[in-house]
Image (tube, rainbow, N blue to C red):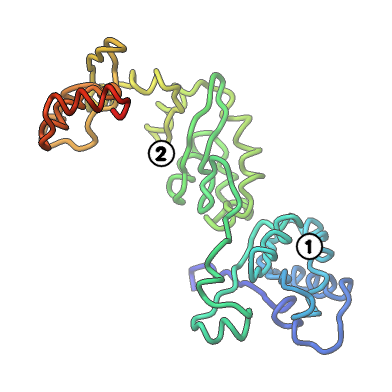
Amino acid sequence: MGEKINILDVSARDGLQNESRLISTADKLTLIAKLVQAGVRDIQATSFVHPRWVPQMADAEALAAHFGEFPGVRFSALVPNVKGYERAVASGVRYLEFVLSASDTFNRKNLNRTLSESLCGVVPQPMGNENFTAAPSGTFRTADRLLNIAANEDSQYHSLCDLIERTDLKTDPRFATPKARSANRDVLTEILMPITRQKTSAEWVRLLNDAGVPCGPIYRVDESFADPQVRHLKMAQPVRSPALGDLTILGHPVSHGETRLPIRTAAPELGQDNEEILTSIGYSKEQIADLAQRGII
């Protein structure tokens, strides 16, 4: 077989959770250490479930405190609900598997809640400008500003490594696959950031585009309107406002053929079209004047 197989080991969680005799945290760590020695690099180690339901998982926080002792290993944990999620995040666990059963009946038996209750209330942890599904994919500091790089696919990542003359990063086990790069995104960013700081964003955009690596400058608002592609597509259009004078605003989002639909007028001022609208639905000028006098319009 030429393809690599990734094994997720769940013995420290699923293999132990139903044992009648409580197993110490130290013994669980011994099991984990032997799994790592055997070459396992993806371990679902515990579950942040209430100890009343699964006493064997009562030491989830204590076990998670030792994950950092096994560099290069991706540790994950099960979370059954919002409380479990909050405990796991507070313990520093970065990779979570959310428990959800295929049927409502089994979900009630297993989690004491309906499927809809399980699906409500769990909010993913914020990751800022990072793409949680791939790496390197996010914001990088250059010599003069910020730049977005999205080398998500292997071919793009390899092109990036060639460009920065770090071909060793292609075969480094921490970054050799998309999954490995996602698991070690922080380490990879620490390696790449000093390199991206050596050139300006404009230089990187030219080099990365030539190398086939998706990227783009991060603009201020005024720079967005000045971008050559924005100008070419006529995405910004001039209008005249009676109150504010000449303005440049976003054009119509839909274009037909080669011509973008024009913006005919600026947004109306408050009450600007009252008379036209009310007349069209049957109000007389006297009635409209009365409404205005009484402060209704």
Check disc 1 and report its element: helix, strand or loop.
helix
Looking at the picture, how far across and down is residue 245, in whole percent? Answer: 28, 10
Residue type of the residue flagged with mark 1:
Ala
Q: Residue at x 22, y 17 (%)?
A: 239
In the rendered image, is residue 267 in sight? Answer: no
Q: Position of residue 138 (x, y in %)?
A: 52, 40
Q: Residue at x 51, y 20 (%)?
A: 200
Indicate left or right for 192 with 280 as reference: right
Determine which residue is flagged by label 2.
214
Give the residue at x 45% y 22%. Answer: 220
Q: Residue 52's quadrant in the figure?
A: bottom right
Quarter of the figure with residue 241: top left
Q: Quadrant of residue 99?
A: bottom right
Q: What residue is pinned by disc 1?
A: 64
Task: Please tell me which of labels 1 and 2 falls first in the chain.
Answer: 1
Image position of 97 with respect to 139: above or below: below
Label drawn at residue 206: none
Coordinates of residue 73 in the picture (x, y in percent):
70, 61
Pointer 1 local density, CA inside 10 Å: few below 14, some 14–19, many at least 20: some
Which quadrant would the C terminus be assigned to in this image? top left
Q: How far apart, in angstroms, are the residues tagged by discs 1 and 2?
A: 36 Å
Label 1 or label 2, whichever lies nearer to me, is: 1
